[in-house]
Image (cartoon, rainbow, N blue to C red):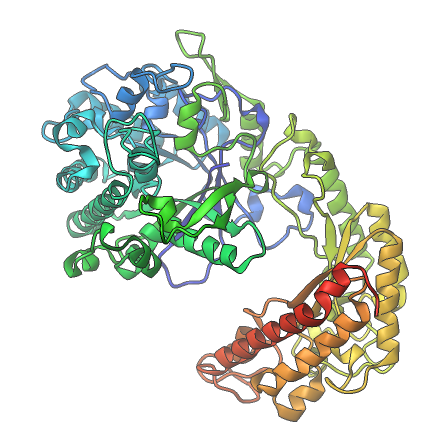
Amino acid sequence: MAASAIVPQVEEKSSLLLVVVDGVDVQLAGTRALVPSSSLFIVVFLLLGAVARDASALTRHDFPEGFVFGAGSSAFQVEGAAAEDGRKPSIWDTFTHQGYMPDGSNADVSSDQYHHYKEDVKLMYDMGLDAYRFSIAWPRLIPDGRGEINPKGLEYYNNLIDELIMHGIQPHVTIYHFDLPQALQDEYGGMLSPRFIEDYAAYAEVCFKNFGDRVKHWATFNQPNIEPIGGFDAGDRPPRRCSYPFGTNCTGGDSSTEPYIVAHHLLLAHASAVSIYRQKYQAIQGGQIGITLMVRWHEQYTDKTADAVAAIRMNEFHIGWFLHPLVHGNYPPVMRSRVGARLPSITASDSEKIRGSFDFIGINHYNVIFVQSIDTDDQKLRDYYVDAGVQGEHSVSFLVSWQGAESPETRFLYGYRLRFGLCGVDFTAAARTRYLKNSARWYSGFLRGGELRPEKSYATLSKLVAGLLAMAAGARALVPSPFIVVFLLLAAAARDASALTRHDFPEGFVFGAGTSAFQVEGAAAEDGRKPSIWDTFTHQGYSPGGAIADVSADQYHHYKEDVKLMYDMGLDAYRFSIAWPRLIPDGRGEINPKGLEYYNNLIDELIMHGIQPHVTMYHFDLPQALQDEYGGILSPRFIEDYTAYAEVCFKNFGDRVKHWVTVNEPNIEPIGGYDAGVQPPRRCSYPFGTNCTGGDSSTEPYIVAHHLLLAHASAVSIYRQKYQVIWMEGTRP
């Protein structure tokens, strides 16, 4: 899955996430380009936070007004006509013609969009697309890399842009997508030379000058944080530069320095182009300009602290390499420290030019990578990954991408063997016949008001959703549903994505449901339970509609029915929270035997039905007694009381509970409760909140977050020192 997000440089709050997907089912075979990544259409989805009334029938109307759905390609992948009408070779033409594609394929004809762009635009129009993201081939527009403009290339892009606009489709243009003119590579080493910066800026200005009256969305580079690695470190992509032992059979190179030099020049070229656009064209043309980065998220492979640090470090090397200078004007501190003098310095003048040189950041997201830390301090031969200090990049692409979803630049290396896309192309036909595939028909139906999933799609998951919605319908909860379902968006698709089943998930994958105590338990004043700050908040009338949780879904009295419903649905796990004011009503001191009995019964009932208990110890419901006594989380005394409460949980339930969460969303409670003051305990200061009970929005959120962090660490420390080994061995006290 190529997932692409647009991150606007705006102040307003937004929860929109744009995701670009290479098609929506495995009927994507028949993509229209040389390489499998070359799906003519890259589908843009929004993962909504708000669920439609019927989550199984999400439609286009559930998306915000003005949300853009589109498709995408790159010039080398789809245009063809590699030696026609004045176009000269790019470094990728040289690479493929030298036989470095596994199947010997090349892009001489490819999907032949150069001759069939009208048909392609008509297909986009028929599907109801709003936008088409394509790249301009530098060696087609300026064949020698600088100097004379090719009139036939200019004509082609003008025609394509006009055709799109005539059909009501926005052109989103990437100025450079890996296809450097071979002439510049031969003349001065391409991106290795600072001369590249000037030539790229001049080429970009040709694009602005000739197309900017109609193009309002520009990306300077596609994935500049990837090209330096493949082309100048591993050397498995053009221009095939590397050094032993990091790459073999290269044409020359130095893996320890050249990737950083190339990235530096790309960054300066980007900033230079943005500067030209802003100074000479933006005010007149009214467009926006940014850059598209590749974002593979890195996670720790084990629970070792060193691996956790390595994951953070790798994200800095991978994402921060470009994003940090774009935002802050310099490379990430960890890169400056570990790479040292091999990392080019950003001068003060360049820093000023680079910092803020974007109106948006585009994000292409493919997968999550698990990494392990390695000790590289004594290693003399170094490259990018040695500098990052990671090894064993374990891809978990099943988490985030559709079938075979390698990144475009990786899939370049697979020839025709993997195929993607919404529109098929008959590569055996000289005319490169096009046809809409089932995925395109589905997408078109959705764009024209149909459901997000076809009627028979994701049968198993749909049943799960339906069951949970049915449970919600019968619940007397303060919140819309007593069960909040956590789903995984899969990367690996079944052979027929419209019939995805549970068996397509990894072995051991857990499906579950979740709640919080205040939302579902009810029995607010029964069996010794005392008020939480949320009880006080709702009883004071601050809940919309005056709703309270005195009864709610009444799980306290109906937990057996609820567990039976979970069992009937086939759930593996139930994530619930323990109500601190039910277990220890005054916040510290005496344990409430009725509260203890209830949670023991719930846990035992779950286990008896083969359902794993996943327990959150604190989910916003601080005992009101602690709030009244010393100000609750604002006081460092909270840390000690929370730790003692957590130990009560470990001691009494840990023999059966193997999954603990200390605090739910501690990065949210300080804002709602102590900055805006719209949630308990309603503390804020003007002008950031009004009608509060007191507070200081400029300091208290940070104090509260600090205490939550320390409380979390304290609880974890106790668990590890006194309980974790015991419970792992299955020993009961």
376 and 566: which one is in front?
A: 376
- Above or below, 728 against 296 in this view is below
| Residue 263 image-quadrant placement | top left
x and y, in percent, of residue 388 in the image? 38, 50
Taking the spot 62% from the left edge, 32% from the top edge, the residue there is 493
Inspect this view and state whether residue 622 appears: no
360 vs 121: above or below: below
In the figure, is residue 424 to the left or right of 167? right
Question: In the rendering, at what x and y percent does residue 325 appear?
Answer: 28, 56
Q: Residue furthest bottom?
A: 629
Q: Who's the residue at 85% across and 56% down the image?
A: 607
Q: Is residue 233 left or right of residue 588?
A: left
- Using the rendered view, name the quadrant where residue 601 is placed: bottom right
On the image, the x and y values in percent for residue 575 come to: 73, 59
Whether residue 694 sits left or right of residue 585 in the image: it is left
How many marks are shown on the rendered structure? Answer: 0
Instruction: State the image coordinates of residue 114 (x, y, percent, origin top left).
Output: 31, 19
Q: Quadrant of the C terminus?
A: bottom right
Name above or below for residue 513 compared with residue 635: above
Instruction: Identify the residue at image location x=44%, y=48%.
Output: 390
Can residue 452 be seen at all in this image of the molecule? yes
